[in-house]
Image (cartoon, helix red, strand yellow):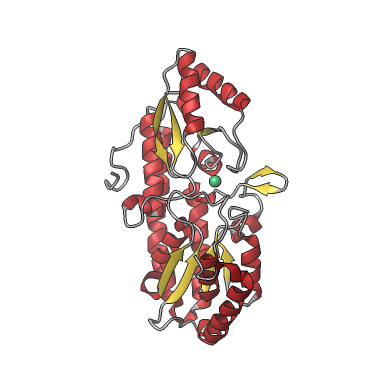
Amino acid sequence: MSAFPRLGSLALAAIGSLVLSSCGKSSSAGAAASDGKARVVTTVAMIGDVVGQIGGERVKVENLIGEGVDPHLYKPTASDVKKLQAADIVFYNGLMLEGKMTDIFVKIAGSGKPVHAVTDSIREQGSYVMSVSPEHYDPHVWMDVTGWTNAAGDIAGSLAKFDPAHEAEYKERAATYTAELKKLDDYARTSLASIPEKQRVLVTAHDAFNYMARAYGLEVRGIQGISTESEAGLKDINQLVDFIVARQIPAVFVESSVPRKSVEALVEGAKAKGHQVKIGGELFSDAMGTAGTYEGTYIGMIDHNVTLITRALGGNAPEKGLNGKLK
Ligand SMILES: [Zn+2]
């Protein structure tokens, strides 16, 4: 929080532009703060993790949106604005994920600072990006490892452009990380394909899993729409209950960044119709696990989701996942 909340954004903008002008020169030369590290500010931690993997010791990464927080609804605080203004380079997801932060990104980019949406290049490809309506993209690209590998490539390119002296280093780390992502992608494909076909259905609280479903052959049913801004209607719940009972789906899932109550309503509804469906566990959708744990990395997050879904729906995956590191 700002020490002077009533001074509002004008005062902050003034502070910000001072910071900007004093960092401007060194930023373009690629050497930033006094410790020599580029100050990178990101929105969601999935981006921050990849920036850290590729930037290594050359970057100091700060994520604005924390564990268990819904990015669709996130409004930047005064302190976030300060951090964005003080950053050397800013990465966000784009595709309208951070819907309430658009204005501040435009403003920061307008000041000449590099501000990158990591999904820009796949959006430009056209056919990859999914939509929920003509004017609303589906932003949850990280759920498909291939999509996020593409974002990692964007991040590597942006870091190299920002700091060309160390381009080779960024490329090398990106190649190493991409190889790990390839293993993760293979694991996801093999594991999820082992679920009996009729039960290869992911029922969860909001539509964060469309990219995952397309990439790995799952059917996906969400209780809420694409954004958690809309309340789930009773009618949607009842329709989904009928589907679960008809297909004898063994498990439904809760998510770390959305309330459990809608999913619990499904379990109760199915029970009333004589079908026991269990809560298969908590998936990471729009936020990763605790920083410093395996689940607090992008690879750990996806490993957790894939392993949990596979096992709960009757497929084969090792209890501790791809790397034997799951809790
Ligand atoms: Zn979401």
Give above or below for 318 relative to 44: above
Foreground pick, 312 / 113: 113
Give above or below for 251 relative to 93: above
Please provide percent x and percent y for residue 206.
54, 38
Residue 126 in view in this figure: yes
Left or right, 236 with respect to 265, comes to: right
Query: At x 44% / y 43%, what residue is drawn?
Result: 256
Location of the C terminus by quadrant is top left
Residue 190 in view in this figure: no
Q: Quadrant of residue 24?
A: bottom right
Give above or below for 75 relative to 218: below
Left or right, 257 with respect to 112, comes to: left
Q: Residue furthest top?
A: 274
Please provide percent x and percent y for residue 201.
49, 29
Query: At x 31% / y 53%, what residue is drawn?
Result: 293
Foreground pick, 143 / 327: 327
Foreground pick, 316 / 137: 137
Q: Quadrant of residue 230?
A: top right
Query: At x 61% / y 38%, what residue is drawn?
Result: 225
Please provide percent x and percent y for residue 125.
64, 56
Foreground pick, 177 / 265: 265
Please provide percent x and percent y for residue 244.
51, 22
**How many numbered discs, if any?**
0
